[in-house]
Image (cartoon, grey):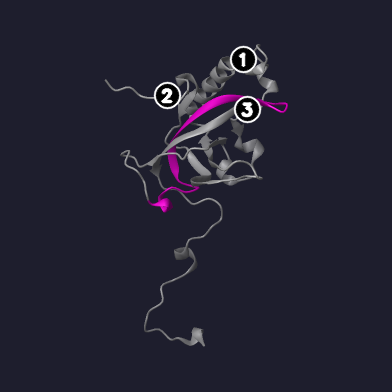
Amino acid sequence: MNLRRNNNMSQQTKVVTGIDTRLSYANVWEPKSINGSKEKYSVSLIIPKSDKKTITAIEKAINAAIQESIGKFGGKKPNKATLKLPLRDGDVERDDEAYQNSYFINANSITAPQIVDKHVQPILDRNEVYSGCYARVSINFYAFNTNGNRGIACGLGNIQKIRDGEQLGGHASASDDFTAIDDNSDDDFLA
């Protein structure tokens, strides 16, 4: 019998995004500290508004996380409008073309995600998964209530790269910056 571990994660609060999800601010190979916080693996997931199946699944998972965490909110279900929620509108909150007509979610984890290709084979080349590529990502939602901040956070699970995309972040590749130099060319530029 094949038993799968759930890692204390409710199936109701877990979502696997659709194939048109794009990675941004992808710190998926090495954990990083943000503003002196604990080092975490993190990524911003850009989800097209047209991917209604993923958006609906996320909204249901957020509602389930609120329901499951009533104890964290003092024993009663809080008004959703009073909570900090992870699903955000790229058209409203980002002045960035990559986020237009999309929602986004920032997901993180202290545990490294497993990163695989379309055939669920491990990706070892760190250049293969980057900000701008498209991937399915497993995420889960959980409540937090600390120092007056209350809401639902998004945990990063695993990543399955689907296809390449234009790199985000304004970092040009060497092939964009340079042309090949013939070994027999004039060496005047070295003088």
Q: Residue furthest right?
A: 148
> What element does badge 3 sit on?
loop
Identify the residue under disc 2: 6
Which residue is rendered at x = 46% and y = 40% of the image?
A: 112
> What element does badge 2 sit on?
loop
Position in image of residue 54 (x %, y %): 48, 28
**Image marks 3 and 1: residues in contact by CB distance under 8 Å:** no
Give the magenta part as a residue range. Answer: 125-150
Front residue of this view, candidates 73 and 91: 73
Identify the residue under disc 3: 85
Q: Tell me the amino acid under the disc marked 2.
A: Asn
Query: Does residue 53 appear in this view?
Result: no
Identify the residue under disc 1: 70
Q: Quadrant of residue 137?
A: top left
- What mark, if any, has residue 91 been given in the picture? none
Label located before the other in sequence (2 or 1): 2
Mark 3: give few (<14), some (14-19) or many (20+) Cα within 10 Å: some
Label located before the other in sequence (3 or 2): 2
Q: Tell me the amino acid under the disc marked 3.
A: Leu
